[in-house]
Image (cartoon, rainbow, N blue to C red):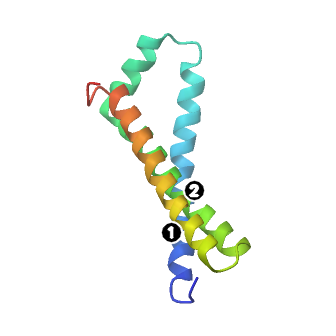
Amino acid sequence: MSGHRGSGHFFRQRFTAVLLIPLTVWFVYNVARYTGADHSTVAAFLSAPMNAGMLLALILIGVYHMVLGIQVVIEDYVEEGGTRSLLMGLNTVFGLLAAAACGLAVAKLANWIQI
C-alpha cells in the first residue's frame, strides 16, 4: 500500500470498529432477549424498521470492516504480483456477495421484499 493511502485505510478500519461496538452490544442484547422465543415473535421484532436497519447496519459495516482487515493480511503476507491482485479482487467480490446476500436476507425478514 502506498504511503498516501495508508492513513485513510487505517482510519476507515478504526472508524468501522468503533461503529461496530454499539451495534454488537445491541445485537448480543437482543439475541439474549429473544433466546427461546418463537419464530413469529422474532420475525415481528425484525420487521420493525429500526431493528431491521440496525441489523442491516451491523452486517454491512461488519462486512466492510472484514474486507479492510483481510486486505491488510493480504498486503502483509502475499508478495506483490498476480496472486496478490487476484486475492484482493476475490476479497472485494466476496465482500460484495456477502453484503448482498445478508442485505437480501434482512430485507426479506423485515418484509421489505417478497420472495
Could you tell me which secondary element the residue under label 2 belongs to? helix
Residue at left offset 54%, top offset 20%:
34
Of labels 2 and 1, earlier in sequence is 1
Determine whether, in the image, residue 29 is placed left or right of residue 105: right
Residue 37 in picture, x, y percent from top left: 53, 12
Q: For the residue carrying disc 1, how many other residues have a C-alpha within 10 Å: few (<14), some (14-19), or many (20+)?
A: some
Determine whether, in the image, residue 36 is placed left or right of residue 104: right
Say the numbered circle drawn on residue 12.
1
Q: CA distance from mark 2 to mark 1?
A: 11 Å
Which residue lies most toward the right here?
A: 77
Residue 83 in picture, x, y percent from top left: 63, 70
Amino acid type of the residue that numbered disc 1 sits on in the rendered structure: Arg
In this view, the mark in front (2 or 1): 2
Considering the image in quadrants, where does the N terminus appear? bottom right
Residue 69 in picture, x, y percent from top left: 61, 63
The foreground one among 10 and 76 is 76
Say the numbered circle drawn on residue 66.
2
Determine whether, in the image, residue 34 is placed left or right of residue 45: right
Residue at left offset 49%, top offset 60%:
92
Residue at left offset 51%, top offset 45%:
23
